[in-house]
Image (cartoon, helix red, strand yellow):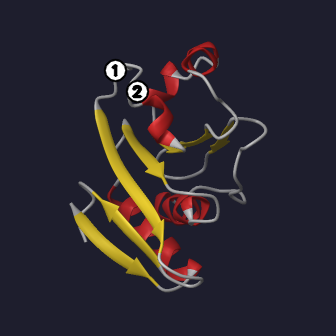
Amino acid sequence: MATFISHSPAETQSLGASWGRRAERGLVIALSGGLGAGKTELVKGIARGLGAAGRVHSPTFTLVNEYAGGRWRLFHLDLYRLETPEQIIAAGLEEFLQPDGVTVIEWAEKIYDLRFTICDLKKAQIEIVNESERRIVYDGFGA
């Protein structure tokens, strides 16, 4: 496990960009953290690191946004509005858990007990320290 203290959205995006540059096909990144913690800022950076085209925004209402044009296709999922295991299973997310590209899941803690098969899962927890600082604890991405 590694810890990164971000002092701004730009620093959070920079960390994400480094992950995107290292990402390999099939990677699933599970993001956890409260509202406003910076999950979408990390995804913006990951997209930049992959070279993905398009403006990244949280897919809270659509559940999945897809970004192409980079090294790998990026699938951005947001499970915030799914409240029960049955809703998550019914949403048909399994194809995104072994992606032909890279998947990033916001509110990923909702899938941990569902026994989905995920080959290359990396987790990141974002904690709000104060108005401008975030503590990001993550595994498997390097520095």
Q: Nearer the viewer, residue 125 or 29?
A: 125
Q: Amino acid at mark 1?
A: Thr
Q: Residue at x 56, y 16 (%)?
A: 89
In the rendered image, the quadrant that contains the N terminus is: bottom left
Q: Is residue 94 visible?
A: yes
Q: Residue at x 59, y 17 (%)?
A: 92
Mark closer to the observer (2, 1): 1
Percent x, y of residue 31:
46, 50
Rounded to the nearest whole Å, what is the CA distance between mark 2 and mark 1?
8 Å
Percent x, y of residue 70:
53, 53
- Secondary structure of the residue carrying numbered label 1: loop
In the shown orientation, is residue 118 left or right of residue 35?
Answer: left
Residues marked 2 and 1 touching at CB (< 8 Å) = yes
* Residue hosting label 1: 117
In this rendering, the count of numbered labels is: 2
- Secondary structure of the residue carrying numbered label 2: loop
Q: Residues within 10 Å of mark 1 (few under 14, many from 20)?
A: few
Q: Residue at x 73, y 43 (%)?
A: 60
Q: Nearer the viewer, residue 75 or 125?
A: 125
Q: Is residue 99 visible?
A: no
130 to 57, vertically: above or below: below
35 to 112, vertically: above or below: below
Q: Which of the 4 quarters of the picture holds residue 9? A: bottom right
In the shown orientation, is residue 121 left or right of residue 91?
Answer: left
Point out the tag, 2 or 1, that comes first from the N-terminus. 2
Q: Residues within 10 Å of mark 2 (few under 14, many from 20)?
A: many
Q: Residue at x 53, y 82 (%)?
A: 130
In the shown orientation, is residue 102 left or right of residue 65?
Answer: left
* Residue hosting label 2: 98
Percent x, y of residue 8:
55, 84
Q: Amino acid at mark 2?
A: Gln
